Image: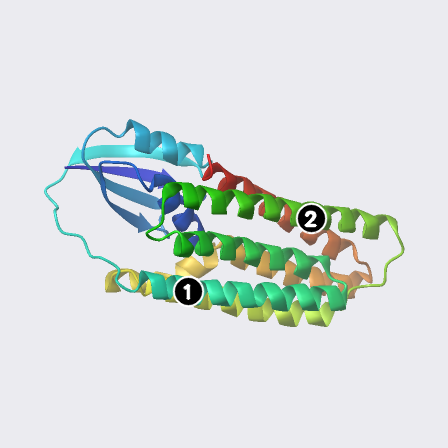
Amino acid sequence: MKKTTFEITKMDCPSEENLIRMKLDGISGIVNLDFDIPNRKLTVFHNGEIEQIEKSVIELNLGGKKISTEQTDKKEFKENVDQKKLLWSVLAINFAFFIIEMATGLISKSMGLVADSLDMLADSFVYGISLFAVGGTLIKKKRIAKLAGYFQITLAIIGFVEVLRRFLGDEKLPDFSTMIIVSIFALIANGICLYILQKSKSKEETHMKASLIFTSNDVIINLGVIIAGILVNWLSSNTPDLIIGTVVFVLVIQGAFRILKLSK
């Protein structure tokens, strides 16, 4: 058996891990996948050639690059018996905050919160595809991925149109305090999700959860909305909120295209 190590420069959180797992699902010869998110490394234990695996990793556009391939005598791997339960937990948290942020974003007139809610929904899609397609056929998984990807793009485009309308119009300032408070809770929720998912790893990796939290794109987005809320209050302008909303909508669309790649 061979062991091939990849560097995945854009693997910031378990959402990207699930995308990679789904992309490589069904490739014959793969024995086990070992993810090191803090160091952005993926180790594939496989039989046979690596070409198809390498091509699939690169196609996800997550900055995948093969580092090395070598022989290994390793034969036993830990199975995660609680994977389904963990996926349900993080799916529930992400979807709950999608609803919370969407509702508070509309009420407070904050595009930053609305955009962040769609980012939460995007993560829900990834976990949902992994969960509902467990044991299912590859065709079923591809259909779910295609629907999720196009739905996500549609919502993001609607968001862009709303940002443009607010930029050109004379809109009331968003409620900066709601932006900050809700984003702080979303920040905590993302940390909880990362912690829950780390429970599926070995005890040696658990101490890395802090670095996981601070390298996650989701957490960076939460901090961005918090900063935008502070600037809205300081500058008495909705421009910071519209800027962070636009940035997050771009990230949501990028995530949607990654999901759509799974449907090909």
Callout 1 amino acid: Trp
Label 1 residue SS: helix
Asked if residue 57 can be seen in this view, the reply is yes
Q: Position of residue 67 (x, y in %)?
A: 30, 34
Q: Which label belongs to residue 222?
A: none
Residue 30 is left or right of residue 57, and the answer is left
Label 2 residue SS: helix
Asked if residue 255 can be seen in this view, the reply is no
The residue labelled by disc 2 is 246
Q: Within the image, what quadrant is residue 262 found in?
A: top left
Q: Residue at the spot x=86%, y=58% of the render? A: 171
* Image position of 188 with respect to 138: above or below: below
What is the crowding at mark 1: few (fewer than 14 residues within 10 Å), some, or many (at least 20)?
some
What is the crowding at mark 2: few (fewer than 14 residues within 10 Å), some, or many (at least 20)?
many
Q: What residue occupies the far left of the structure in this picture?
A: 73
* Image position of 257 with respect to 237: above or below: above
| Image quadrant in which the N terminus is located | top left
Residue 260 is left or right of residue 112, and the answer is left
Q: Position of residue 79 (x, y in %)?
A: 22, 57
Q: How is the image coloured?
A: rainbow
Q: Residue at the spot x=29%, y=36% of the render? A: 27
Q: Residue at the spot x=26%, y=41% of the render? A: 44
The residue labelled by disc 1 is 88
Q: Within the image, what quadrant is residue 186 found in?
A: bottom right
Q: Residue at the spot x=43%, y=48% of the render? A: 16
Residue 196 is left or right of residue 248, and the answer is left
